């Protein structure tokens, strides 16, 4: 702290930084690829919440889960009800083998934006990972209510119904998915039968 205070006090026209400014500088450091020090006197703008979310998503897609998790947490610290951050952080937790943590996040996203089909699809994935197949099927049915032509939702519903032992309705769901998107479903169905 003493070094930082000396640095700030030796800069022309500078003053000590309050906690909010330090957080912004820290956020900027996380968003930079080199992760080097940022001189607040030369920084023209700090990353917005949406820019941080974009960086988190890029890191997530690149498989850098720990870095993506940190960035999602920063976004959620700034905006706790940010539905996209909640949803994506939940998917990260599911991908990282933490379905209970995923459930809490994805449920919040779905509750905040109940008309968003992808949140319900994500809930279905989480419920399926938790072996809660009835709830997974219900989530996929909510997706299909909003988008009856979603081959992915029909297929996922079929997987959940098959897990419940409801083979007749699973076959109907698989057939509907295959009708909507033939090539993808033929390969995927082979893996689930």
Image (cartoon, rainbow, N blue to C red):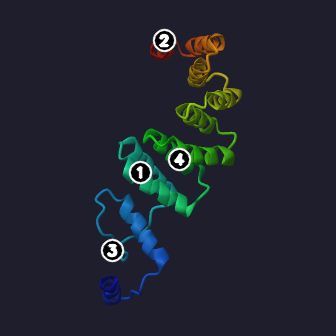
The residue shown at (47%, 44%) is: 93
Gap in angstroms between the C-alphas marked 2 and 3: 55 Å
Gap in angstroms between the C-alphas marked 3 and 4: 36 Å
Vertical order, 5 against 79 (above or below):
below
Gap in angstroms between the C-alphas marked 4 and 2: 33 Å
Image mark for residue 57: none
Precedes in sequence: disc 3 or disc 4? 3
Q: Pointer 3: what residue?
A: 39
Q: Pointer 4: what residue?
A: 101
Query: Splitting the image into 4 quarters, where does residue 63 fall?
Result: top left
Give the side of residue 34 with respect to residue 162, left or right: left
Q: Pointer 2: what residue?
A: 186
Q: Pointer 1: what residue?
A: 68
Precedes in sequence: disc 1 or disc 2? 1
Question: Where does the image place residue 158, in percent across and percent down from the top left?
Answer: 59, 19
Give the side of residue 136 with respect to residue 95, left or right: right
Question: Where does the image place residue 101, in percent across and percent down from the top left?
Answer: 53, 47
Precedes in sequence: disc 1 or disc 3? 3
């Amino acid at each position: 702290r003493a070094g930082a205070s000396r640095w700030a006090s030796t800069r022309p026209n500078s003053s000590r930084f309050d906690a909010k400014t330090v957080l912004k500088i820290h956020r900027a450091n996380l968003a930079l690829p080199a992760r080097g020090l940022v001189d607040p006197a030369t920084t023209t703008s700090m990353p917005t919440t949406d820019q941080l979310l974009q960086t988190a998503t890029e890191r997530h897609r690149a498989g850098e889960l720990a870095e993506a998790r940190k960035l999602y947490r920063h976004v959620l610290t700034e905006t706790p009800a940010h539905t996209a951050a909640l949803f994506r952080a939940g998917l990260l937790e599911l991908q990282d083998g933490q379905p209970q943590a995923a459930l809490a996040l994805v449920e919040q996203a779905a509750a905040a934006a109940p008309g968003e089909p992808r949140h319900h699809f994500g809930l279905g994935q989480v419920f399926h990972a938790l072996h809660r197949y009835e709830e997974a099927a219900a989530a996929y049915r909510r997706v299909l209510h909003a988008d009856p032509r979603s081959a992915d939702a029909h297929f996922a519903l079929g997987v959940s119904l098959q897990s419940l032992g409801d083979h007749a309705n699973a076959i109907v769901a698989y057939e509907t998915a295959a009708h909507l998107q033939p090539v993808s479903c033929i390969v995927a169905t082979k893996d689930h039968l």
